[in-house]
Amino acid sequence: MNKILSVIHNKWFTLVCRILLGSIFIFGAAVKLPDIKMNSVNVVYEYGVLPIEPINFAAAWGYALPFLELLVGIAVLLGVFTRLASLGGGLLGLSFVIGEGIVLSQGRDINCGCFGGLIDTMMSVTIYLSIAMALLGILICTSPNRNFCSITDMIFQKFKTIPKLLKVLS
């Protein structure tokens, strides 16, 4: 068990995980942002998982999702509030797994909308990407080396006294 932990908590492995997770989220957001209604909101409606009455949670999630993905992707990639950002990325990945799982359990295999209209990807395939995203978020969040080669690491090295809350979040 110690060998496995030493590998997954290795600073280079954690950095590669950060680059992968951040890049996936940034790419996903970048292809949705040019036409959010078509590439995100309509896809969330197609899932049919979130309610639209009395409050339209489906539309709210569809409009917010590309911005959340972009924020998480940039933060994880640059290492800003790395623990919080990777936890957010893991939770986003988990929400994708749950949504895709519900749709697949209904016997439907639709285009997941992960990468807008750029790449057509079916849920039966992308559910594995969503699982990987959730796992990467957990690995990064729990790694003691999550701030290796990050903006947070540079700031912590420059300033010797860091508020405890900032240390917890990053």
Image (cartoon, rainbow, N blue to C red):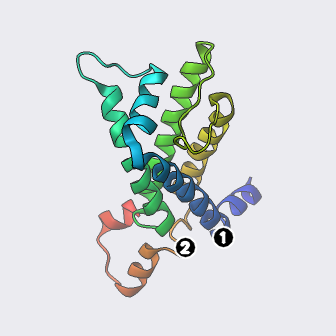
**Above or below for 152 versus 46:** below
Identity of the residue furthest to the top in this view = 106
Question: In the image, what residue occupies the spot 34% across and 84% down?
Answer: 159
Label 2 CA crowd tier, 10 Å (few <14, some 14–19, many 20+):
some
Cα separation, mark 1 vs mark 2, equals 8 Å
Asked whether residue 38 appears in the rendered view, the answer is yes
Given residues 12 and 52, the one toward you in this image is 52
- The three-letter code of the residue at mark 1 reads Trp
Q: Quadrant of residue 165?
A: bottom left
- The three-letter code of the residue at mark 2 reads Phe
Task: From the viewer's perspective, tell me whether residue 7 is left or right of residue 47.
Answer: right
Q: Secondary structure at mark 1?
A: helix
Label of residue 148 in the image: 2
Q: What is the total number of numbered labels drawn onto the structure image? A: 2
Kindly identify which residue carries mark 1.
Answer: 12
* Residue 20 horizontal/vertical position (percent): 61, 58
Question: In the image, what residue occupies the spot 45% across and 38% down?
Answer: 39
